[in-house]
Amino acid sequence: MPVVDAHIHAYPPEVFADPVRWGAEQGEAWWTRCVAPPGRRSLQGWVTIDQLLRDMDAAGVDQVVMLGWYWERQATCDWQNDCFREWHRAHPDRIQAFASVNPAAGVTAREALERALDAGLCGVGELLPQVQGGRLDDDDWSGVFALAAARGVPVNLHVTDPLSCRSEAAMVATPLDSYLQMIQAHPGTTFILAHWGGGLPFYELNPRLKPLFKKVYYDSAASSLLYDPSVFRRVVDITGPERILWGTDYPLLTHPRVAREPTFRHDLDEVRGSVAALTPAELELILGGNMVRLLRR
């Protein structure tokens, strides 16, 4: 089974040559604050596509899934989708990509999403209403979820652990009850909740709620910045291994004390290590089997 990173980001060189200037020119204030937070060191790394492929080869990663940012402007989403289409077409066996969209743009957003999916992108997200505007239960957001269900593609949403909002520069509160209501309202949509769903897997311990989560997946992006590696074992014991996706948030510097450049190696070592305590069968699903199954749908 191939190793698939279900959550990475990528930008062309003109973006990271001067991210502050680029973000200002595009009107993407939140993105700029996240990648270049004022007054403190950024954990954001930057790589070319050639470097991404070299890093994948060095770590034994077979495929990656590029996620769009939760852009504030639909025009930026369209631009990113154009980049993703180009990179996927150049490396179809290595690079898959989800479509970036801002649901708050209404019909324009849904039409753009249709075009992106028709062009070969294979999912939707990463999305975040607290930055993009609107609410998970309004008509625009519900329209995107319904479209994804009709097209049979998953939707990835950013979720923040309520106890992890230490810095407004990089995090925004995402009330977990709104995600629970979203799941209830859209049983036909497959959701991927990033960053371990902000702790939402533990809601599955409630026998009344657990049946609602059949089509909900959790990715482990930025796990080492949020939780002890034992989170893998603990969540598997609650949900089973079939709905967990290994993701890194590459090229984020997820192990800044030991790696000053983007790499997949430390995240792979963590999930395969003794603290994560996963069996070979569980690892096979989490490191690629589950994502391959989702993409084949």
Image: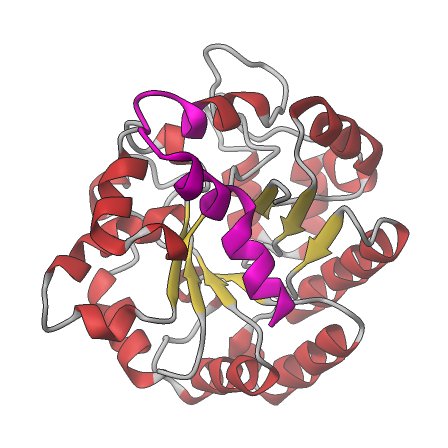
Report the coloring of the rendering: secondary structure
Foreground: 132 or 257?
Answer: 257
Does the magenta portion include 290? yes
Q: Is residue 243 above or below residue 233?
A: below
Which residue is rendered at x = 18% and y = 53% of the image? Answer: 202
Pick the front one: 167 or 230: 230
- Identified at 22% across, 46% down, the residue is 237
Quadrant (top left/top right/bottom left/bottom right) for the C terminus: bottom right
Residue nearest the observer in this picture, 230 or 184: 230
In the drawing, does residue 231 fall left or right of residue 41? left
233 up-or-down from 138: above or below: above
Residue located 61% across and 67% down the image? 123
Residue 110 visible (yes or no): yes
Image location of residue 170, percent across then percent down: 42, 40
How many marks overall?
0
The percent coordinates of residue 9 (x first, y second) are 63, 45
Determine which quarter of the picture holds residue 164. Answer: top left
> Magenta residues?
270-297
Residue 109 on image: x %, y %: 63, 80
Query: Within the magenta stretch, is there residue 251?
Result: no
Q: Is residue 17 visible?
A: no
Residue 9 vs 212, above or below: the answer is above
Q: Look at 43% across and 89% down and name the residue there.
A: 139
Predominant SS along the magenta part: helix
Location of residue 53 in the rendering, given as x and y in whole percent from the top left corner: 78, 33
Give 142 or 187, whichever is nearer the viewer.
Answer: 187
Name the image quarter holding residue 159.
bottom left
Residue lying furthest right in this view? Answer: 90
User: Which quadrant of the figure contains the N terminus?
Assistant: top right
